[in-house]
Image (tube, rainbow, N blue to C red):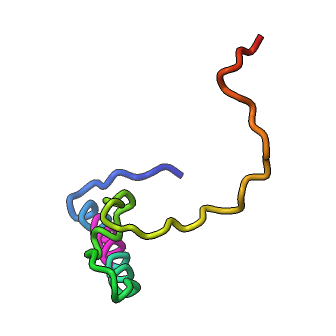
Amino acid sequence: VGIEKPRTLDELLLKAQAYIQYEEVEMADAIRHARPGDNNSARESHRKGGDRRKNDKHMEPRGPPSLFSNYTPLTVSRE
């Protein structure tokens, strides 16, 4: 059930090649699905962080709005 360590350099390169191919497919998908108006390179759009100051686009909603209308203030002592 554990992860086997590669015994030879060939085994290591074989595993690395699988990861390289996966990254290449992901990069190709990012390029293929990029919008024509975007000026970002595929590598920049693929990164999670990026520099959001350059793009003044609206943020996508992250899910349903909060169900709570009142919150406990954090400055009140527990006692």
- Image location of residue 67, percent across then percent down: 79, 52
| Numbered disc total | 0
2 relative position to 12: left or right = right
Look at the image and give the residue range highlighted in magenta: 16-24
55 relative position to 76: left or right = left
Q: Which residue occupies 43% across, 70% down?
A: 57
- Image location of residue 76, percent across then percent down: 70, 19
Q: Which residue occupies 79% across, 46% down?
A: 69
- Image location of residue 64, percent across then percent down: 71, 62
Q: Quadrant of the C terminus?
A: top right
Q: Is residue 72 above or below residue 5?
A: above
Q: Most extreme residue toward the left, as rendered?
A: 9
Q: Is residue 5 above or below residue 22?
A: above
Residue 13 placement: quadrant: bottom left
Q: In the image, is residue 52 part of the stretch drawn in magenta?
A: no
Work out whether residue 27 or residue 35 is closer to the camera in this orientation and state it.
35
Work out whether residue 20 or residue 42 is closer to the camera in this orientation and state it.
42
41 relative position to 70: left or right = left
- Image location of residue 36, percent across then percent down: 34, 89
Q: In the image, is residue 17 part of the stretch drawn in magenta?
A: yes
Q: Which residue occupies 33% across, 81% down?
A: 38
